[in-house]
Image: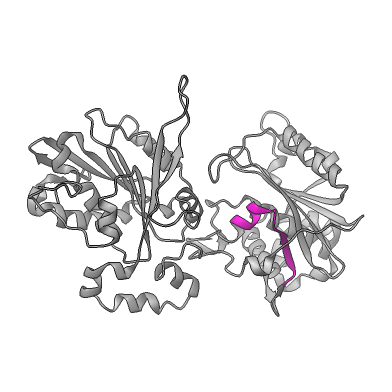
Amino acid sequence: MVDRLTPGSTHVLWTPQPGPQTTFVTCPYEEVLYGGSAGGGKTDALIGDFAAGIEQYGSAWHGLIARRSFPMLAEIEKRALEIFSPHYGASSYKKSERTWYFKTAKGVATLKLASIDDEIKVIDHQGQQYSWIGMDEATQWPNDNVLEYLITRTRSPKGSPTYIRLTANPGGVGHVWVKERFRIGKVPDMHPFSVSGRRREGQEEGHTIQRVFIPARVTDNAVLMRNDPTYIDKLNNIADPILRKALYEGDWNIIAGAAFPEFSLEHHVCEPFEVPEGARVIRMMDWGHAKPYACLWQYVNFDGRTYIIRELYGKGKKPGEGSRESCPDVWEKIRSIEESMGWNVVQSFLDPQCWAEHGGDSEYTMLGGAKARWQPWPKGPNSRRQHKQLVHDMLKVVNGESRTQIFDHCEHLIRTLGTLPIDPRNPEVVDTNAEDHAYDAFRGGNATRAVFNRFGKRGRELEFFDGLDAAVTPSTQNFGGW
């Protein structure tokens, strides 16, 4: 295949399989996501999509394929050599540069492989220009910052079109932003939708791009089914039902590697009701400026059932981005909410990092200080692991019921609690690269209450300052006595 299946093409580097692969490499839209189940032919689709422009655009065609780490590039490198070497020769690939140079009748096209871990590493590509950019396994990046920067590198002074291509399986630390960016579940699959960019001065509207999600299942990969017919059985026999749904069925409503797989809308979300007058309300907050802040309010009824009754979430325009509000402004919002609701806030818990001073007033002080009655939550060597176990215990479903309920208007706690992934290096904790701010407020506040209830105020102080939180485990909590 020389170009986007233009009639009259005579040289064939690679041919897409009928179905999703063909749809992908012939798709005219600017930003496309391809993926779903494992074995759907994502690597071939990505390489083939770039190959479509080599002969057609020549020296105007420059591409980049990115993975989050260097070892992840090995399979792409191997497959690209198999596809390109028969025509362009193995010497067209400069391994030291991780770059192919394709000599065509219209000049030299290039394709570079790069490992880009985060938004700092991506700056290495400043000054570069690409007409085609591919991000393989996009859900491995915690947010879309790398993608957004790379998009600024897509330009074509010689007049070729520009394309952004992503591949992904459900799950991973970036599951939420990929799903939201391509509106999976909100827009029908393979239906393009328009996104308007920011308008420049003097423009009535910004540049409009079209995005589309093209799902692929392992059964769409006829070559794999023929060469390795047992692979589909390997996916179908995955013991973990959540992982099986993600990798075998390509289900984006399931999170592979979810930190809290027990969380469900059915068991943990309820319709709001009026909190009893005089009820003891607890405030819990995780502060953020460039990242979102999250403030939650909860109360515990007479039989020990916990209700999250309100949230205030400082979210920017993109997932994981903060609203960049000032501490005094946010404190005024908190105070206004509590005053309007008439709540009796008896305890307030805040991330202990807020007590640090950085050449001026601390965030604790600017968030109301003593007037807000903030207390720092416990933070010791094993606190994140113990807090996670506490949340598991609070979300436990017994006889079809959970003792923790979240009002359905607390959308960000609900949205993120069910999609948080575990840390791939430590399955006992949540991946802190994910959007964990509402979770941090929830687990930090309740961990403090658990210690406070067990030891009293002095015990809480000892726990916080001396790191004695190892004594607090889910089996020792007396939830009914809160």
So how many labels did they put on this image?
Answer: 0
Q: Answer whether residue 409 is magenta in the image.
A: yes
The residue lying toward the viewer, choosing from 432 and 160, is: 160
40 magenta-colored: no
Foreground residue, 482 or 359?
Answer: 482
Relative placement, left or right, of 476 versus 119 is right
Residue 372 seen in this snapshot: yes
- Residue 403 lies left or right of residue 252; in this view the side is right
Relative to the observer, which residue lies in front, 421 or 419?
419
Residue 190 lies, with reference to residue 257, above or below; the image says above
Residue 189 spot, x, y in % from top left? 41, 57
Which residue is located at x 33 percent, y 44 percent?
A: 29
Q: Quadrant of residue 222?
A: bottom left
The residue range painted magenta reads: 402-415
Residue 124, above or below 282: above
Residue shown at 20% from the left, 74% from the top: 227
Determine whether 213 is above or below 224 in the image: above
Percent across and percent down for residue 448 are: 76, 57
